[in-house]
Each structure stands twice: as C-alpha cells, then as structure tokens.
Amino acid sequence: MTEPTRPQRAISPRLLLVAGLFVATLVTSNIIAVKLAALGPFTVPAAIVIFPLSYLFGDVLTEVWGYATARVVIWTGFAANVVAVCFVAIAVAVPSSPAYPDGGAYSAILGMTPRIVIASLVAYLCGEFINSFVLAKLKIATGGRMLWMRTIGSTLLGQGVDTVIFISVAFGGTLPFAVLRVVMRDQWLLKVFYEIVATPLTYAVVTWLKRREGIDTYDRSTNFNPLALGGLAR
C-alpha cells in the first residue's frame, strides 16, 4: 500500500517574477556591454545602465526570501549567462547568408573574446555572493533596521569586488595600471550612485513584497556556503 502523497506548496509567483527579472538583467547586460557609453565625463560600458538593477533585485531576494533562495537564483543567472554566451558564439560562427550583408558587423558587435566572458562570469559570481552575504549578515546585526544602510553597504562591497575583478581580468596587461584604476573607480562610483538613487524603489518593493508574501526572512541558521544549493522558498 502506497502512502498518500503530501501536497506541495507552489513557489510564490512573486518570487518567480523577481528571479526572472534578475536573470533578464544579467543576460541583457552581457549583450549590451560591448558598447562604450559616454555619461558626462565618464566612459563606461553601456551595461551600466541596467546591470546595477541585478543588485537591486538581489537585495530584494535576500531581504525578503533569504540568502538560500538568493543563492539558487544567483546560480540560475550564471547558468543563463553561460547558455546565452554559447548560443551567441554559435550564431556568430554560422556562416552568413549572401542575402545578409551585415554579417561582419554582427560578429564584431556580438562576438566576445574568451577573456571578457571569463572576466564577466567570475566577477558576477563573486560580486553577487558578497552582496547577498553582507546584506544577510547586516540584517541580523541591525535587527532588520536601516535597510538603506544595508543595501548601500552591501553594494559598496559587492560592486567593488565585481568591478575590480572584471576590469583586472578583462583588461589587465592591455592598459596602463593608471587607466585601469580610473576605470575601476568611475564604474564603482556610478554603480554605487545608482544604488543610492534606487533606494526609495527598493524600500517600496521590499515593503510590498513582505506584506503580500507574509514573510521576513532572517538567515540566523543559514549555511552560507555558495555551493550548498537548496530549494527555492515557497
């Protein structure tokens, strides 16, 4: 005689929405990063207009559902990036039709060197996990107060690590150190400024989600090993 199957609670559709937006910003960032944009006196990859949103969504995931759920979504974003990079590489490698005269431009824009890809993926993992870890620990230390301090503080560290790793791995040895240092500083400052400006939006989204979800997760007994994958929150 078989035992009755215990019904499973569905994963929150709001969690799936935030996770989907998180992954979408990451994949889109990789595609548009090839363009250099001029923002006032700064010359930065065009991805800077959207990539910081991944930290906003990461903050929301950790603050509402906890580090364990954010960990699964971070790895999901990593897998999505790898898949996107592989498919783009295949599309670039396929010979262009004579009816398509822009094959060279297509390859020049979307073709990414292995060094850039590795820099992007490593920087993303390190930066996102540090951001989530710091935010979760600060939440416990502050008793859930001062969300603005926790989101900005975690971004200072996470985006700092992300920027240093990406610029160092992607461009180290090809540009003078003085130039690399300026690029790192400018990107880091702009990303942190982005987080500060977005703080009211973060407050609004977190408050709404906590009320609708009926949860406010504290990672007091969480295993913070990035490789210890667990299930998504329900």
Image: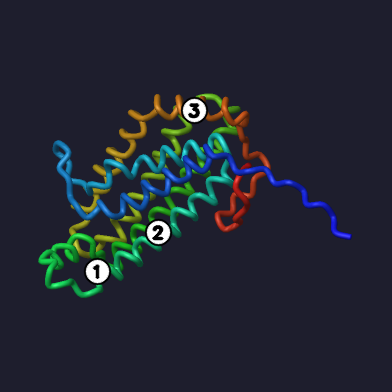
Residue 182 x %, y %: 21, 47
Tell me the element at label 3.
Answer: helix
Q: Residue at x 15, y 67 (%)?
A: 103
Q: Residue at x 67, y 43 (%)?
A: 9
Compared with residue 104, is residue 63 higher up or lower down, i.e. above or below?
Answer: above
| Residue on which the image places disc 3 | 147
Of marks 2 and 1, the one in the foreground = 1
Q: Residue at x 48, y 49 (%)?
A: 129
| Residue on which the image places disc 2 | 122
Query: What's the amino acid at mark 2?
Result: Val
Whichever of callouts 3 and 1 sits on the residue coming sooner in the sequence is 1
Query: Marks 3/1: CA distance?
Result: 44 Å
Residue 175 x %, y %: 18, 60
Compared with residue 52, is residue 197 higher up or lower down, i.e. above or below?
Answer: above
Q: Residues within 10 Å of mark 1 (few under 14, many from 20)?
A: some
Q: Is residue 200 left or right of residue 139?
A: left
Q: How many marks?
A: 3
Q: Could you tell me which quadrant the C terminus lies in?
A: top right
| Residue on which the image places disc 1 | 92
* Front-most of residues 58 and 107: 107
